[in-house]
Amino acid sequence: MRAWPALLLPVLLQACMGPARPVPGAAAVAIPAHWRSDGGSGAVTADWWRDFQDPALDALVDQALAGNPDLQIAATRIEQARAQLRGAAAAARPSAALASGASSGRSVNAFGVGVDQERAQGELDVAYEVDLFGRLRQSTQAAREEWLASADARDALRITLIATVVQAYIGLRAADARLEIVRQTVDERRQERDLIGRRFRAGYASSLEAQQAEAALEAATRLLPSTMLARTLQENALSQLLGRPPGAIAAPGEALAWPAAVPASLPAEVVRQRPDIAAAERRLAAADHRLAAARAAFLPRIQLAGSGGGVVSTLLDDPISLFSIGGSILAPIFQGGALRAGADAAAARRDEAAYAYKATVLQAFREVEDAMASLRFLTEEAQTAERQVAALDQAYRVGRRRHEAGYASYLEQLDAERALLSARLDLVQLRFQRLTAIVSLVRGVGGGWAHE
């Protein structure tokens, strides 16, 4: 009966822990059944960018995956988390330490006589904590979830890197297309300036038309520096993604192929296919394990220890062996509120992780919705822009024939030409924005990532 208080002590201490705080209800995520916009019907593969059928793009993605510093930093974080997992797991295993020492000295015995002694001692100490209430196990599980979360975060960064490289390359190709249109326009206006100049010197054109042709040429030439600047900035951004200093990046002249199918996934599938959501989920699990470990700190710790060794001395005829074995129970009684504060902090961090998970899921839903809406409306706008370019091109041809026949002024032809140039540049931008929207949609649905 005298042993009952000791047996009941853990139960009483368990009651001191109080009830576990549940996850806030506001952190729950409501997953919609369908998207607002209509999606596609294609599946995303891990090497989805090859659907553009551009070897130069394939080479750039390979270089980015091999040399991007952010991706390399993410790899080191995985190694850090893995080392922390090993450290947490080691705390739950037995530990051993070897101690040895030697000394030479003189002491006074009980008869007041000095005694010289040469002494050496060696000892092996072994200790082990019995994880009766799971504190160490929960800490190890938390470290494991953090390690897996770091790997998921690396995968999320990899998908973002690939999408960013592809979008930067699309921007580079768009700059090339705009540059080609501007150069064609400059050549055409230079020919018109020279033609009107000859007509002016022959007396068939006015000075006003000659000045208008000169101004039109300068206006088109003015577009060259800004277009070249945009291309240079795209090259610099792409070079940084590749992990190398800014430099020229050549792009082939062939048009990018349109992907065979537009990716699509249901909202519930996106939750399973995005590594950033998986990482947020693992961080939430890690916070749960840390909360459980903080609550287990209220309960007793059982320590087992043992040691064995020997002593050799000039005062002894034979060495003496030493050993000890035993255990101890450390039950927290009063810590000044430190344990309660630790548990409250762990619960708050768990709630923070729950809200962070919800925010990550909502952000994913928004990205997919934005990409699908962008693809839909950009397609409609591009179709309208194509009809506009066709109409303006016809108007320009009519205005040019009227001017050459003397039925209209050069200003009428020039107005039609300006409108056509602006529409052509807008159409190029819309076409490449559609490709960028597809890349955003691929990234939004997970970029071909699968749970391992």
Image (spheres, grey):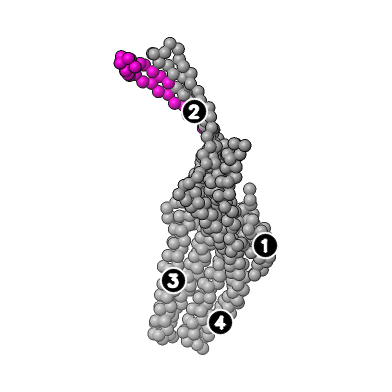
Q: Earlier in the sequence, mark 1 or mark 3?
A: 3
Q: Residue at x 40, y 15 (%)?
A: 313
Which residue is the site of mark 3? 223
Of residue 27 and residue 194, the one placed in the foreground of this image is 27
For marks 2 and 3 on the same chain, the one whose residue lies earlier in the sequence = 2
Q: Which residue is mark 4?
A: 395
Which comes sooner in the sequence, label 4 or label 2? 2
Q: Secondary structure at mark 4?
A: helix
4 or 3: mark nearer the eye: 3
> Residue 125: which disc?
2
Secondary structure beneath label 1 = loop
At label 4, counting other C-alpha atoms closer than 10 Å, the crowd grade (few under 14, some 14-19, many 20 or more) is some
Looking at the rendered structure, the kind of residue marked 2 is: Asp
Is 323 on the left-hand or right-hand side of 35? left
Furthest toward the front, the residue is 1
* Residue span colored magenta: 94-121
Q: Position of residue 122 (x, y in %)?
A: 45, 22
Prevalent SS, magenta region: strand
Question: Disc 4 versus disc 1: distance between alpha carbons?
Answer: 46 Å
Mark 3 falls on what kind of element?
Answer: helix
Q: Residue at (60%, 72%) from the top-left corner?
A: 377
Q: Is residue 237 visible?
A: yes
Measured as percent of width and height from the top left, residue 334 is found at 48, 46
Is residue 119 within the magenta segment? yes
Q: CA distance from mark 4 to mark 2?
A: 95 Å
Viewer-nearest of labels 1 and 3?
Answer: 1
Disc 3 crowd, CA 10 A, few/some/many (<14, 14-19, 20+): some
Q: Which residue is mark 1?
A: 266
Q: CA distance from mark 2 to mark 1?
A: 59 Å
- Name the mark nearer the viewer: 2 or 3: 2
